[in-house]
Image (cartoon, grey):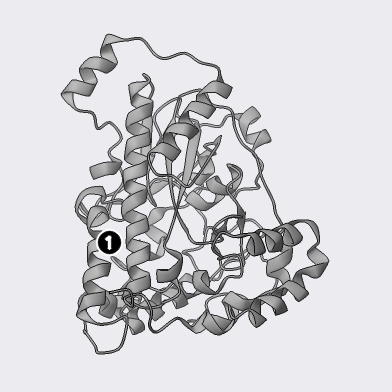
Amino acid sequence: MRPSQTQPSHPAAEAEFPLVVPEYRFDQRNEMFKRRTWDEDVWRKVEPFYTEVHHEERYGFRKLDYALRNAAWSIEGAFAQGTQSGNRGMYCWDYVTDKVRHHAQADARVEHSPEDNARIVKKAARFFGADLVGICYAHPNLVYSHELDLISGQHRPIELPDGCTQAIVMAVQMDYGAMHHAPDAISGAATGLGYSQQAVVAHFVAAFVRGLGYQAIPCGNDTALSIPLAIAAGLGELGRLGLLITEKYGPRVRLCKVFTDLPLRHDTLRPFGVAEFCQVCRRCAAHCSAQAISFGEPTVEGPSSANHSGVRKWYIDPEKCYAFWGQNRMDCTRCVAVCPFNKPTGRPYDVARFFVRRFPRLNPLLLRLDKLAGFGRKSAGRKEGFWDSL
């Protein structure tokens, strides 16, 4: 049964929101990574991922590779803590030093038009390390109804501060070469580095907005659902694999956001052919070791209570996906690695993106060419290469 919690609505803004969203707010307690703390069946399946480390001789699972992975996660784990709790560490909602507080109070708010504010914030976000940035309305039904704090153990309601109805959504790209090692510690390092970098970006952008005299709430995976906000902010489209697919980096990004009361001009949807391409591709589903990605059509209901059901889209089965992490004792990004949208920059790939965007009838041909170019053969993961330059 779905909960019925809702935040105070803003009818005009919600009417203009470019996505259909579920009519209820999702309780983070049901999110897969939080379910392991109270669902014994889930914990039984994923416990090896958290408790068993077996250094092996095979590439990607050696002590060397684990050291890289653990280092990449260190900022997120030690300082950001967004995977554990919201409003904590680098994602603290009101962090400010005494010196910054003094200067912020000395001056009035910086007053610009929403258009100028958007331009200024985007410039600052890119300066601080965001690869993509967009702005949208912070739809209340995309904010979690409750948070499950893994540090304190508390299960508490979430409400954004009054007036924080703007969302600055940012993407940080993950390393292209490391991703192709999935599912091992090298690809895990790319993921961990993305989490650490997104925390730095969100922290900096929030500090910048506070310096202008406004409220700023930095978030990683906590507080609200990132993918639909990123879609509404024009960063990409939802793919069959259940992730945001961006035009420049494909699904090879990590997402963070900052909620604020700073007046900002909103971006809008920027479709570029993902839905049509995913209809005929299915490569992520074919290469998913957990068989967690659907080969079929979009549906309205997901297969698990960990899905935010209620709108027509492709849902993954997060229970199958997470169980594979336990079996492999490592997180998995194989779906990201094999996605045809996951390409480096360059003219041939830009041309392909143009045809996907403008001529969807050619998608089957583009898929065949992609496989002939060797990307299909790489889909099982590159077993060597990352450390070759030593």
Q: Residues within 10 Å of mark 1 (few under 14, many from 20)?
A: many
Residue drawn at x 80%, y 69% as measured from the top left? 362
Residue drawn at x 38%, y 79% as measured from the top left? 385
Task: Left or right? Give the position of 173 relative to 190.
Answer: right
Of the pair 114 and 359, the residue shown nearer to us: 359
Residue furthest out toward the left: 98
Check the image and report above or below for 58 versus 301. Answer: below
Residue drawn at x 53%, y 61% as measured from the top left? 251
Residue furthest out toward the front: 389
Of the pair 13 and 208, the residue shown nearer to us: 208
Residue under label 1, please give it: 72
Q: Quadrant of the C terminus?
A: bottom left
Q: How many marks?
A: 1
Dividing the picture into quarters, in which one does residue 301 lie? bottom right
- Which percent across, then down, holds residue 312? 67, 59
**Three-letter code for the amino acid on which mark 1 is drawn:** Ala
- Which percent across, then down, holds residue 322? 40, 74
- Which percent across, then down, holds residue 333? 44, 71
Of the pair 192 and 155, the residue shown nearer to us: 192
Disc 1 is placed on an element classified as: helix
Task: Left or right? Give the position of 296 relative to 36.
Answer: right
Task: Left or right? Give the position of 255 relative to 363.
Answer: left
Residue 110 seen in the current view: yes
Task: Left or right? Give the position of 259 relative to 361.
Answer: left
- Which percent across, then down, holds residue 370? 66, 75
Residue 7 seen in the current view: no
Residue drawn at x 36%, y 43% as measured from the top left? 201
